[in-house]
Image (spheres, grey):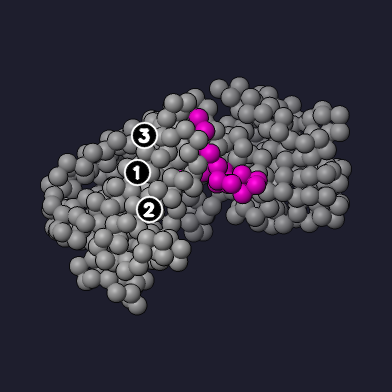
Amino acid sequence: MNKIYKNRRKKLIDLLESESSILILSNQTQYKNSDIEYRFRQDSSFWYLTGLNENDSALLIIKHKNNDYDEILFTKARNKNKEIWTGHILGLERASEYTEIKKVYRFNDLEDFFENNNICNFKKLYFDFAGNSYLDLRKKILQIAKQKRCQEIINSEYLISELRIIKEDYEIDLIKKSAKINCNAHKTIIEMCMNNNFKYEYQVYAEFSKMFLKENANYAYEPIIASGKNASILHYVANNQEMKKNDLLLLDVGCEYEYYASDITRTIPLGKKFNSAQKAIYDIVLKANIAAKEQAFKLNATIQSVHDVAVKEIIKGLIDLKILKTSFDEALETKSYMKFFMHKTSHWLGLDTHDVGFYTEKDNSSKILKTGMLFTIEPAIYFNEFYLEDYEVPKEFLGIGIRIEDNLLKTDSACEVLTEIPIKL
Ligand SMILES: [Mn+2]
């Protein structure tokens, strides 16, 4: 197991320029209130490179002029008084054994290490200085690096995402498992919803929780169980409203299994039958979803071309319904369609739901989809009453929100769709 992480570090070291270093911090324990801790979730990049689930830890890799390198791990020491309350701490010795990193220091000494070593007057320091844990420590390290005339401080994502964006077979297996658990839950719960088994959104939430937890999985993010016009709010997470029989229900639920996410959205009519406005919009979104997937299957397709194809279907559909009252070209040019479809069609998927990785190359061209990349396809149309108040949309469309989201793995020959959930009406 630990060989996986060691190999990844080796690849990272190969990417790192000489006289440069990279620092990756673990996640910090977050508190709900007073001394009540949220369940700990490791920082994805720290996990990716070490496989350690400890907070108060950091990985520092230094590459010298002659291309020799140092791997240094910082972690917290064992502590009987703490361990009686919150359990097992790995400690320096065992962390060293597990990772096979020989130089292991206390996390509390990280700042001093930067202060007293010459790594900061190196050419480059890769470091996520804008991360949202250990704010004071991040600021301090940035300060020290600047004081010591580090020539360039670069977001570590630039380096790590080059590795993380292409998934290893080991990762693909875990994502497939995550997608399978998620698909099974969606299939079962969609069937139950269409048979009106639930009265409130939170009852649907409870069912997803049960189906995930019994597979040793959990949510990748707060699920969106949005009935009626709640579906026109992109990240609706209150999940506490009564569901009405002829409303739509949008289910956007992410499953995390062994750190890996799948991210699925289906929108269904609660009474098993769409009304004509719902059906018209659903058909456009479904067409956009299918067309975008076909595009992704093509050789050398870019992530932008997948979005363009989805946008094209959405504009065409909205013009046919006379919701957009301009020519196709004008809608594209003025981006008037963005009142109804305001996000991108895809994001990368992996350890993070919105996984690391840039969408363009250094020359600003869109990234070509390559074997081992995992991404979503999620076209949508929303008619949010509040957002659209100045726009003329026939009344029957107001409040509708429809999104259909699949997860795809780019393969040598085409693409594998990991989320087949046919909706039987
Ligand atoms: Mn998504």
Coordinates of residue 280 in the picture (x, y in percent): 21, 56
- Please name which of the two marks, 2 or 3, marks the residue nearer to the observer: 2
Coordinates of residue 259 in the picture (x, y in percent): 48, 37
| CA separation in Å, label 1 and label 2 | 9 Å
Q: What's the residue at 68%, 32% (across, down)? A: 12
**Image quadrant of residue 179?**
top left
Residue 157 appears left or right of 205: right
Q: Earlier in the sequence, mark 1 or mark 2?
A: 1
Instruction: Identify the amino acid type marked 3.
Output: Val
Does the numbered disc 3 mark a residue whose Cβ is under 8 Å from ligand 1? no
Is any part of residue 76 visible from this angle? no
- Please name which of the two marks, 3 or 1, marks the residue nearer to the observer: 1
Q: Quadrant of the C terminus?
A: top left
For the residues labelled 1 and 2, say whether their Cβ atoms are less than 8 Å apart: yes
Q: Earlier in the sequence, mark 3 or mark 1?
A: 1
Residue 406 appears left or right of 259: left
| CA separation in Å, label 2 and label 3 | 22 Å
Instruction: Identify the amino acid type marked 2.
Output: Lys
Coordinates of residue 421 in the picture (x, y in percent): 26, 38
For the residues labelled 3 and 1, say whether their Cβ atoms are less than 8 Å apart: no
State the residue position of label 2: 312
For the residues labelled 2 and 3, say whether their Cβ atoms are less than 8 Å apart: no
Residue 85 appears left or right of 25: left
State the residue position of label 1: 291
State the residue position of label 3: 417
Residue 205 appears left or right of 63: left
**Image quadrant of residue 3?**
top right
**Crowding near the residue tagged with mark 1, few <14, some 14–19, many ≥20 C-alpha atoms within 10 Å:** some
Q: Secondary structure at mark 2?
A: helix
Q: Does 334 appear above or below 195? A: below
Q: Earlier in the sequence, mark 2 or mark 3?
A: 2
